[in-house]
């Protein structure tokens, strides 16, 4: 038996950026964290472009992200997966959930939803008006019924996380009225189809994970291992994104920016490395990566990569 075949479960990680802009410091941290976790476990690291919400996609952004990863020396395994090409897989999953009699069409307007909503942990939650309606509508959004069970998992950094979906998040959307599949559904189907074993991503998605585990359970998929990294916020405490004017990664300062990402994740690359090349950087990072040093949150981190307007 060869060395690779002797392990039945191999680490398969992924980085799943949404192409709504160029790679910025916040997404760089998620890329570096997921890459180092995969590679230090002798695993594979895949890149999936999460462009399921095509109207929000920015032209050229996915190519830009991929070229930046390549330039930085983060080489992915296999081909890049694009969610925009996977509608049939998502539809198949919806079909299975519908057979379980767990989906229903929701024809409520945005205003009706807000007027009847109750407060959950992620904001106002849908009150379930259309749950009982038994409409035969083919239009509208498609929602999944939630229930009062506790869904919990142990996050490798954030610890124990539990939610009662019915009261915490409410019945959620699988497919929007405009036909766009919801992130929660697409991510679950893709992680399963790609045989992902470990998810390393930003802590802003921690509250979505119980909904994803719920779908995994219903669809008979394996439940994954989760690690939610601290997220990068700007000086106002807002997550870095295009909306908060995060600047994109500056390729002329590749090593300093990668080092900043490592510092953010609690690692301690020596300052002298600022002047070294990318291969020396990766050698150090792969040899010295310590998960136990990653902070749960990093609110005090002063990030020089945000522009203030
Ligand atoms: N596409 C999501 C984002 O860019 C990440 C999804 C995930 O890692 O599950 O925020
Ligand atoms: Zn409704």
Image: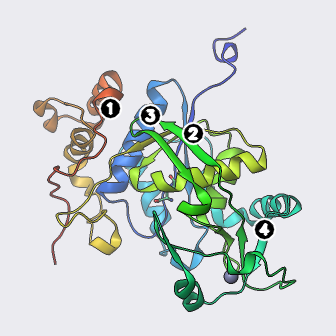
- Answer above or below: position of 14 versus 92: above
From the viewer's perspective, is 260 left or right of 6?
A: left
Q: How many marks?
A: 4
Q: Is residue 163 above or below residue 306?
A: above
Mark-to-mark CA distance, 3 and 2: 24 Å
State the residue in front, 71 or 132. Answer: 132
Helix, strand or loop at disc 2?
loop
Q: Which mark is residue 77?
A: 2
Instruction: Indicate how the structure is coloured in the image.
Output: rainbow
Q: CA distance from mark 1 to mark 2?
A: 17 Å
Q: Name the residue tied to disc 4.
A: 103
Report, in whole angstroms, how far the alpha carbon at label 1 lies from the one at label 4. Answer: 47 Å
Give the quadrant of residue 91.
bottom right
Residue matched to label 1:
282
| Mark 1 / mark 2, whichever is N-terminal | 2
Between residues 223 and 57, which one lies in front from this camera angle? 223
State the separation of the CA atoms marked 3 and 4: 32 Å
Do we see residue 163 in this rendering?
yes
Q: Counting other residues with Cα less than 10 Å from the Cα at mark 3, is it few (<14), some (14-19), or many (20 or more)?
A: some
For label 3, the SS is: loop
How far across and down, in percent of the image, does residue 26 sit? 32, 55
- Sequence-wise, the earlier of marks 3 and 4 is 4
Q: Between marks 4 and 2, how big is the CA–CA gap?
A: 35 Å
Q: Which residue is mark 3?
A: 156
Q: Nearer the viewer, mark 4 or mark 2?
A: 4
Quadrant containing the C terminus is bottom left
Select label 3 or label 1 by which is in front. Answer: 3
Q: Which circle, 3 or 4, is nearer the viewer?
A: 4
What whole-number distance in Å separates the C-alpha atoms at marks 3 and 1?
A: 23 Å
């Amino acid at each position: 038996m060869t060395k690779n075949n002797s392990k039945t479960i191999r680490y398969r990680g992924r980085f799943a950026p949404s192409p709504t802009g160029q790679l910025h410091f916040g997404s760089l941290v998620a890329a570096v964290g997921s890459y180092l976790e995969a590679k230090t476990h002798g695993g594979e690291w895949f890149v999936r472009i999460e462009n399921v919400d095509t109207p929000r996609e920015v032209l050229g952004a996915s190519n830009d992200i991929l070229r930046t990863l390549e330039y930085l020396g983060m080489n992915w395994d296999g081909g890049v997966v694009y969610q925009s090409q996977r509608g049939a897989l998502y539809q198949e999953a919806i079909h299975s959930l519908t057979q379980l009699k767990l989906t229903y069409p929701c024809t409520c307007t945005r205003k009706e939803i807000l007027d009847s909503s109750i407060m959950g942990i992620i904001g106002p939650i849908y009150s379930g008006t259309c749950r009982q309606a038994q409409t035969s509508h083919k239009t509208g959004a498609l929602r999944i019924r939630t229930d009062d069970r506790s869904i919990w998992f142990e996050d490798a950094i954030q610890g124990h996380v539990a939610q009662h979906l019915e009261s915490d998040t409410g019945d959620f959307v699988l497919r929007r009225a405009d036909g766009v599949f919801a992130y929660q559904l697409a991510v679950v189907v893709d992680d399963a189809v790609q045989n992902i074993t470990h998810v390393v991503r930003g802590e802003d998605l921690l509250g979505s994970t119980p909904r994803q585990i719920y779908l995994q359970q219903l669809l008979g998929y394996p439940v994954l291992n989760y690690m939610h990294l601290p997220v990068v916020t700007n000086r106002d405490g807002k997550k870095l994104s295009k909306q908060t004017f995060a600047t994109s990664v500056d390729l002329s300062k590749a090593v300093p920016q990668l080092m900043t990402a490592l510092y953010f994740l609690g690692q301690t690359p020596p300052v002298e490395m600022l002047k070294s090349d990318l291969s020396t950087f990766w050698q150090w990072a792969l040899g010295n990566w310590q998960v136990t040093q990653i902070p749960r949150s990093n609110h005090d981190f002063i990030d020089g990569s945000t522009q203030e307007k």
